């Protein structure tokens, strides 16, 4: 079965510090990978998505970046965090398989920038 | 580009009431459609899905039918429980947009005993 791991679950970081959130997928190959942020309220903002190693599409310009160094690894980074970067970050994957597209989420990382 | 529009709520119901959360979409090609649920403090869980026109997705008493003619995927449940209180997201994936996963803004459902 496929699983998605996202860590850490919670993180408190000072303003100006770097960030690295990691997401890995098991049990599948060549998935599409996504990073979302859920800020105040409940809306989901797509930050980055990737259809293959080294292929990153950015949806919203900001001080975050993403990388996909391996097929099933997706990393969200920042060199200097801002207060506005606080939020709930969700990693997801999708795969077209036998004509059916499925998409699943990790448990999320709650980031508080202080 | 792709988009999903769902009623924003909040929706407040009494236990055993009938639930409908409307969702309509625009997409390139023939998307797969999903409903996700987010319980307080947790990530998103896939509730149900449908991959082609007239498909009905169902799970835990919830149902949604893929209506191509009205580009809709409304979520329904005949009798809600307090434990159904959560945020519900309608979403789609379309091959025409390179499989980008697009969400609606979410609907907060509160069920009172």
Image: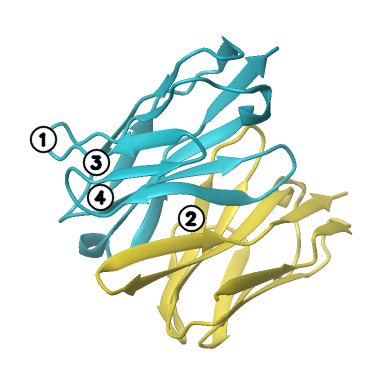
Chain colours: A yellow, B cyan
> Disc 3 is attached to a residue of which chain?
B
CA–CA distance in space, label 1 to label 3 = 9 Å
Q: Residue furthest left?
A: B69
Callout 4 secondary element:
loop
Image quarter of residue A74: bottom right
> Disc 1 is attached to a residue of which chain?
B
Q: Residue at x 35, y 25 (%)?
A: B22
Q: Answer whether labels 2 and 4 touch (C-beta < 8 Å).
A: no
B46 in relation to B16, above or below: below
Callout 1 secondary element:
loop
Q: Is residue A60 left or right of residue A112?
A: left
**Residue B69: assigned label:** 1
Q: Nearer the viewer, mark 3 or mark 2?
A: 3
CA–CA distance in space, label 1 to label 2 = 32 Å
CA–CA distance in space, label 3 to label 2 = 30 Å
Q: Is residue A76 left or right of residue B28?
A: right
* Residue wearing tag 4: B1
Neighbourhood count class around disc 2 (C-alpha, 10 Å): few under 14, some 14–19, many 20 upward: few
Q: Nearer the viewer, mark 1 or mark 2?
A: 1
Question: Which one is earlier in the sequence, the residue at label 3 or at label 4?
Answer: 4
CA–CA distance in space, label 2 to label 4 = 15 Å
Q: Do callouts 1 and 3 point to residues on the same chain?
A: yes
Can residue A76 be seen here? no
Q: Nearer the viewer, residue B87 or A53?
A: B87
Question: Which one is earlier in the sequence, the residue at label 4 or at label 1?
Answer: 4
* Residue wearing tag 2: A60
């Amino acid at each position: 079965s496929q699983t998605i791991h996202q860590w850490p679950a919670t993180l408190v970081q000072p303003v100006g510090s770097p960030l690295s959130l990691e997401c890995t997928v098991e049990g599948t190959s060549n998935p599409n990978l996504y990073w979302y942020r859920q800020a105040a309220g409940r809306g989901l903002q797509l930050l980055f998505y990737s259809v293959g190693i080294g292929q990153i599409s950015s949806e919203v310009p900001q001080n975050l970046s993403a990388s996909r160094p391996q097929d099933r690894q997706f990393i969200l980074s920042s060199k200097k965090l801002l207060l506005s970067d606080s939020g709930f970050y969700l990693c997801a994957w999708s795969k077209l398989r036998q004509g059916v597209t499925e998409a699943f989420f990790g448990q999320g990382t709650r980031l508080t920038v202080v | 580009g792709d988009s999903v529009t769902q009623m924003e709520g909040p929706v407040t119901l009494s236990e055993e009431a009938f639930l409908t959360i409307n969702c309509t979409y625009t997409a390139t090609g023939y998307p797969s459609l999903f409903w996700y649920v987010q319980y307080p403090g947790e990530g998103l869980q896939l509730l149900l899905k449908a991959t082609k026109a007239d498909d009905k997705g169902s799970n835990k008493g919830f149902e949604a039918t893929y209506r191509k003619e009205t580009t809709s995927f409304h979520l329904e449940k005949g009798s809600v429980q307090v434990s159904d209180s959560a945020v519900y997201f309608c979403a789609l994936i379309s091959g025409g947009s390179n499989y980008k996963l697009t969400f609606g803004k979410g609907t907060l459902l509160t069920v009172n005993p």
